Amino acid sequence: MTSKKLKASITGVHGYVPDYILTNRELETLVDTTDEWIVTRTGIKERRILKGDMKGTSILGVECVKGLLNKTDTDPKEIDLIICATVTPDMLFPSTSNLIADRVGASNSYGFDISAACSGFIYALATGSQFIEAGTHKKVIVVGADKMSSIIDYEERKNCVLFGDGGGAVLLEPSEDENGIQDYLLKSDGSGGDMLCLKAGGSLKPASIETIKNKEHYIYQEGSSVFKFAVTNMADISEEIMNNNNLSSDDVAYLVPHQANKRIIDATAKRMGIGPEKVLLNIEKYGNTTAGTIPLCLWDFENKFKKGDNLILAAFGGGFTWGSLYLKWSYNN
Ligand code: ACO
C-alpha cells in the first residue's frame, strides 16, 4: 500500500499596508516624472509608505500576523515556525521573523528570514511547505513584507515610482484533502546580481561616508535589462509549471503574479494563454512591495477563490531569482 504524501494548505491569509498614500501626483512634485509616464510604463497609480522614525519591516509583519491569528482563531503559542521573506529586514540580524514572533506572542516558534527579493514569498512558501509535508510541523506562518521606502532615493525618478511598503502572511497547515501546494519551481542566476542590488551596507562594502555620498544604500537597478530578464523568465517558468502538471489554460482559475510592472504580468498571462479575467492585479494601489506583492494579492482577492481552484503564483526579482508555485485553494469564504 502506498501512503499518500501529506500536502501543505494555506488555511488563512492576511495583509497589511500602511495608511500613507504616495500618489503619482505627489511624485510629480518630487522628481521629473508624470502620472501618465508611470501609469503607461508600469500600471502603478499609488503606493503606501510607512512613515515615522524607528519603524521597520517587522511592523508590517506583526500587523499581518496578528490579523492572521485573529482571523483564523489561532493561539500564537500553537505556531511552530515563522518564515519571513524580506530584503529590508529591520537589521541585518537578528532576523525579522524573530522580532515578529516575539511581538505576536509566538513563544513556542522559531524563525528565520529568506532573502530572495521579489521571489522571496514563493521561496518562503515552498520552504514552509516542506516542514508541513515532513509531518514535523503543524502550523507554519509565511510572511512576505518589505519597507521598500527605506532603500529608495526620492530624488531619483527611475526607482521611486516603482516601489511601496506592505506585506502579507499565510498560515500553512496539513491538508485534509487533495488541495494545497501541489508543485513549485525555484530558480536563480547570480550572474545577474549586479543588475539589481543594494551595493553597500553588507560585509563587502560596510557603511562609510563614501557609500553614503555615493548613494549606495539605495536600490540600484538597470531597469530595462531587468525588464527583459523578468519578461522571459516569469513567462517561461509559468508555462513550465503548467506543462509539468498537465494544466491547460482552462484548468487555471487565477494567475497570482508578482506585481512589478503590468507589462511583465501581461506577457506572462499571454504565454499561459489566459485572459485578463484570470489575472489578479493590485499593482495600481500598492506598486511593487517586493516580497509583499503575492500575499497582498491573495489577501485582496481571497473572496474570489473557491475550494479546489487552481492558482499559479509566479515571480521574478533581484538575484536574479524567479519561481512559480501551483496550489489548489483549500477553503471557501
Ligand atoms: N518618469 C519619467 N521618465 C522616466 C522615469 C520616470 N519615473 N524613469 C525613467 N524615465 C525615462 C528614462 O530616463 C528614459 O529616458 P531616456 O530615454 O531619455 O534615457 C526613458 O524614461 C525610458 O527608460 P527605460 O528604463 O528604458 O524605460 P522602460 O520602458 O524600460 O521602463 C521600468 C522602466 C519601468 C523600470 C522597467 O524597465 C521595469 O519595469 N523594469 C523591471 C522592474 C522589475 O521588474 N524589477 C524586478 C523586481 S524588483 C526586486 O526584485 C526588488
Image (cartoon, rainbow, N blue to C red):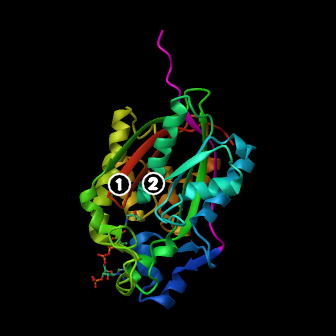
Question: Looking at the image, is 166 positioned above or below residue 83?
Answer: below
Residue holding disc 2? 120
Residue numbers of the magenta segment: 1-19
Residue 11 is situated, as x and y percent measured from the top left of the image, at: 63, 40
Q: In the figure, is residue 195 to the left or right of 328? A: left
Residue 188 is situated, as x and y percent measured from the top left of the image, at: 31, 51
Mark 2 element type:
helix
Question: Looking at the image, is 47 positioned above or below residue 186?
Answer: below
Q: Which residue is found at the position 47% from the left and 42% from the top? A: 127
Residue most extreme to the top? 1
User: Between marks 1 and 2, how big is the CA–CA gap?
Assistant: 8 Å
Residue 111 is situated, as x and y percent measured from the top left of the image, at: 56, 49
Residues 145 and 251: in front is 145
Asked if one can make out residue 141 in the rendered structure from this viewpoint, the answer is no
Number of residues whose C-alpha sits closer than 10 Å to that of mark 1, classed few (under 14), some (14–19) or many (20 or more): many
Q: Is mark 1 within 8 Å of ligand 1?
A: yes
Q: Is mark 2 within 8 Å of ligand 1?
A: no
Q: Which residue is found at the position 75% from the left and 50% from the top? A: 70
Mark 1 element type:
strand
Asked if one can make out residue 46 in the rendered structure from this viewpoint, the answer is yes
Q: Amino acid at mark 2?
A: Gly
Q: Quadrant of the C terminus?
A: top right
Q: Are circles 1 and 2 on residues that touch, CB within 8 Å?
A: yes
Residue holding disc 1? 321
Q: In the figure, is residue 12 to the left or right of 246? A: right
Residues 94 and 41: in front is 94
Number of residues whose C-alpha sits closer than 10 Å to that of mark 2, classed few (under 14), some (14–19) or many (20 or more): many
Q: Earlier in the sequence, mark 1 or mark 2?
A: 2
